């Protein structure tokens, strides 16, 4: 979401630069930026690395009354044209309690005078395109149009706020290489800080009185590799907690354990889940025909998924961004963010006698949340846990020792129905917000069989090598979500072109005569029917042999691992694929050669492929099952060989000979 916001801000800034005053030439480049710009760029970066961060420094000064002043220094060298987008300064602030006191930027270009960007070049924008709450805003300066390869862009910001927590978090890099990254915390006399390190061995701070500094240098780029973990799993970070002297109260909230976090968040959310008459009436109307509690949950979940989503950053805004708006207000306005939608669903279920609790989770990286640092700042999303009875057998449930069986559901994800869970949330630690009964729980992980794509392909092969074919697919679970996302992301015509491209990439010259998608989301299914023909699928050799591949169309998603070595783990999601291809053979030909059967068994998956002739038809079957798993780079050879053998099996030909 944040990257999408930045893209829209780039457009705004470009418009602004056309009509606003030009950047001012200036000789007041600060010493920290001049010093950072003198650092040479290491010569061992791959050519596609767009920029290198020379300095990323944040200093946080905490005062006894809870006031926090944050100073940021940032410098980046642009290495190629794509790196210009990093010539961008930004600082968030909360409209109710915070402000950006100063934001300035400079662009240092080879053989040219420095450019200074100040108040006249600063824009102030909402964090969301549809700004209905306006609780978090962004000040920014863009030099993307001025920067070029070799330029150094730097900025300095000073912001103020009131402390919500006695905790801070610092990630030392994003995907760019970073030469120097520092996080500094200045505390009042007598106070102390403790830290937890993630994704790296313990980083000990340098302590001078009540000033603490965590620093890393010469961090390499986090490069793209197929199926690698997210940057947030790979980049080192620290969680810092600070403490006042015994007996001295602070403005911020501290947490000794996850139960403390649950109690605090419950105090934030519980009062906001009170239903009103209008909400109650709607809940009863939606469930009038429901026969079971599960059907009621499905009806309410379907309704809440359709409530317009408006993003408010968790970790910012009222109460740190963790207090939802009142359920009645969200219902009346029909929009809200993730915690608002979860809270609305909770309130509507309450009117039906069904109990539910919020769940705080990190969306986008199942490995992000760590047990060792009890903090609500580890979360960026909110979903829901609904109490159900043992008759509910969907795979996305957990068993709580006192609260009973809980169904986990994300009412913000309008692609995933009740009974399923987005794959990037499965298996992650998440906080059940249930007062003293709450705590950190592992989210359920669905099996490959529940995320299945089943395909039936009927082919007529003619003596000249041409074919006509029918493909019928049924996807369930997250496989259905993937298909659903593809269809919804495009217009109908663009979706048809997408499917046509997939078919023609598998069968050169194919002409589709039918493409019919059918989305039965709330039954957990997505169906696709395709008819096509191709004039030259089989290769006729010397008018005697006819050669063709029985795997007519490819699997939709293929993991291609071709590199000889691997730096990062391989991350696989749970999925299953099964296809039966029946090929009616042409008159006057008989099978001369079939591919050998293939059967692969590994700890992370299984694959099989087999060809046989039955009643004048060739029957080809292939099955793939993958488990949700992370394979370390030292075992890369095993997973690469697994997928290489699959590719070989799926490109092996059948040879027919003329009788």
Image (cartoon, helix red, strand yellow):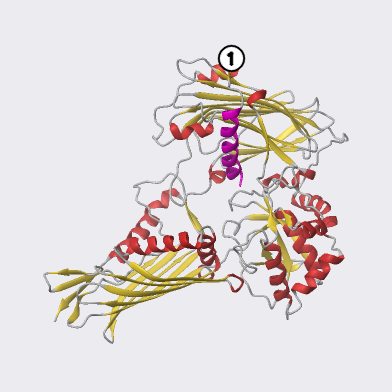
Looking at the rendering, the stretch of residues picked out in magenta corresponds to 1-19
Give the main secondary structure of the magenta stretch: helix
Q: Tell which residue pokes out farthest to the left in this image.
A: 542
Q: Quadrant of residue 546?
A: bottom left
Q: Tell which residue pokes out farthest to the bottom in this image.
A: 615
> Is there any visible trace of residue 602 in the rendered image?
no
State the image coordinates of residue 242 (x, y, percent, origin top left).
75, 35
Q: Which residue is mark 1?
A: 26
Horizontal side, residue 118 vs residue 47: left or right: right
Q: Is 16 above or below relative to 351?
A: above
State the image coordinates of residue 448 (x, y, percent, origin top left).
51, 67
- Look at the image and tell me in which quarter the C terminus lies: bottom left
State the image coordinates of residue 608 (x, y, percent, origin top left).
37, 70
State the image coordinates of residue 204 (x, y, percent, origin top left).
63, 32
Horizontal side, residue 561 vs residue 289: left or right: left
How would you rate the neighbour count of disc 1 (Cα within 10 Å): few for under 14, some for 14-19, many for 20 or more? few
| Point 18% across, 80% down: residue | 589
Q: Quadrant of residue 358?
A: bottom right
In front: 530, or 416? 530
> Is there any visible trace of residue 57 in the rendered image?
yes
């Amino acid at each position: 979401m944040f990257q999408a916001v930045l893209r829209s801000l780039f457009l705004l800034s470009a418009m602004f630069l056309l009509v606003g005053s030009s950047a001012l030439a200036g000789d007041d480049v600060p010493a920290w930026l001049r010093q950072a710009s003198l650092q040479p760029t290491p010569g061992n970066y791959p050519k596609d690395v767009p920029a290198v961060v020379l300095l990323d420094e944040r200093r946080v000064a905490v005062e006894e009354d809870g006031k926090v002043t944050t100073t940021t220094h940032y410098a980046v060298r642009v290495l190629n044209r794509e790196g210009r987008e990093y010539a961008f300064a930004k600082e968030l602030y909360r409209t109710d309690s915070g402000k950006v006191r100063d934001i300035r930027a400079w662009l240092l270009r080879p053989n040219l005078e420095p450019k200074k960007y100040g108040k006249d070049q600063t824009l102030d924008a909402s964090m969301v395109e549809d700004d209905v709450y306006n609780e978090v805003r962004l000040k920014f300066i863009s030099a993307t149009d001025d920067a070029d390869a070799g330029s150094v862009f730097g900025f300095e910001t000073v912001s103020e706020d009131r402390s919500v927590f006695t905790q801070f978090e610092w990630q030392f890099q994003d995907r760019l290489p970073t030469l120097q990254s520092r996080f500094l915390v200045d505390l009042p006399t007598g106070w102390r800080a403790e830290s937890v390190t993630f994704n790296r061995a313990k980083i000990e701070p340098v302590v001078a009185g009540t000033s603490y500094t965590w620093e890393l240098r010469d961090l390499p780029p986090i490069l793209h590799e197929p199926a690698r973990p997210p940057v947030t799993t790979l980049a080192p970070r620290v969680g810092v907690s600070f403490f006042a002297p015994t007996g001295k109260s602070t403005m911020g909230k501290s947490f000794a354990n996850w139960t403390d976090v649950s109690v605090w968040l419950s105090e934030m959310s519980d009062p906001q889940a009170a239903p009103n008459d209008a909400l109650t009436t709607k809940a009863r109307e939606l469930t009038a025909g429901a026969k079971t509690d599960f059907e009621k949950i499905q009806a309410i979940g379907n309704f809440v998924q359709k409530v317009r989503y408006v993003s408010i950053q968790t970790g910012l805004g009222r109460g740190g961004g963790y207090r939802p708006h009142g359920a009645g207000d969200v219902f009346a306005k029909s929009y809200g963010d993730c915690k608002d939608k979860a809270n609305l669903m909770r309130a509507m279920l309450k009117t039906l006698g069904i109990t539910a609790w919020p769940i705080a989770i990190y969306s986008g990286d199942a490995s992000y949340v760590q047990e060792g640092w009890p903090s609500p700042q580890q979360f960026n999303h909110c979903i829901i846990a609904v109490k159900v009875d043992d008759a509910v057998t969907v795979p996305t449930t957990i068993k709580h020792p006192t609260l009973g069986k809980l169904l986990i559901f994300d009412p913000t994800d309008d692609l995933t129905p009740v009974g399923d869970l987005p794959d990037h949330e499965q298996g992650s630690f998440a906080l059940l917000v249930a007062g003293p009964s709450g705590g950190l729980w592992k989210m359920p992980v669905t099996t490959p069989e529940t995320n299945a794509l089943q395909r039936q392909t009927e082919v007529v092969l003619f003596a000249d090598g041409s074919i006509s074919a029918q493909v019928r697919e049924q996807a369930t679970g997250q496989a259905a979500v993937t298909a659903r996302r593809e269809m919804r992301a495009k217009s109908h015509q663009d979706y048809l072109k997408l499917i046509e491209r997939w078919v023609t990439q598998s069968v050169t010259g194919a002409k589709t005569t039918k493409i019919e998608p059918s989305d039965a989301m709330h039954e957990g299914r997505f169906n696709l029917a395709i008819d096509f023909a191709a004039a030259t699928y089989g290769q006729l050799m010397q008018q005697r042999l006819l050669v063709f591949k029985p795997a007519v169309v490819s699997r939709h998603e293929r993991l291609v691992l071709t590199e000889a070595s691997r730096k990062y783990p391989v991350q696989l999601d749970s999925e299953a694929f099964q296809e039966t291809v029946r090929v009616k053979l042409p008159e006057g030909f008989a099978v001369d050669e079939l591919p050998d059967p293939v059967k692969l068994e590994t700890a992370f998956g299984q694959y099989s492929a087999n060809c046989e002739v039955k009643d004048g038809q060739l029957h080809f079957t292939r099955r793939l099952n993958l488990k949700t798993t992370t394979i370390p780079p030292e075992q890369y050879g095993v997973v690469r060989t697994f997928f290489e053998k699959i590719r070989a099996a799926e490109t092996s030909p059948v040879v027919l000979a003329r009788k």
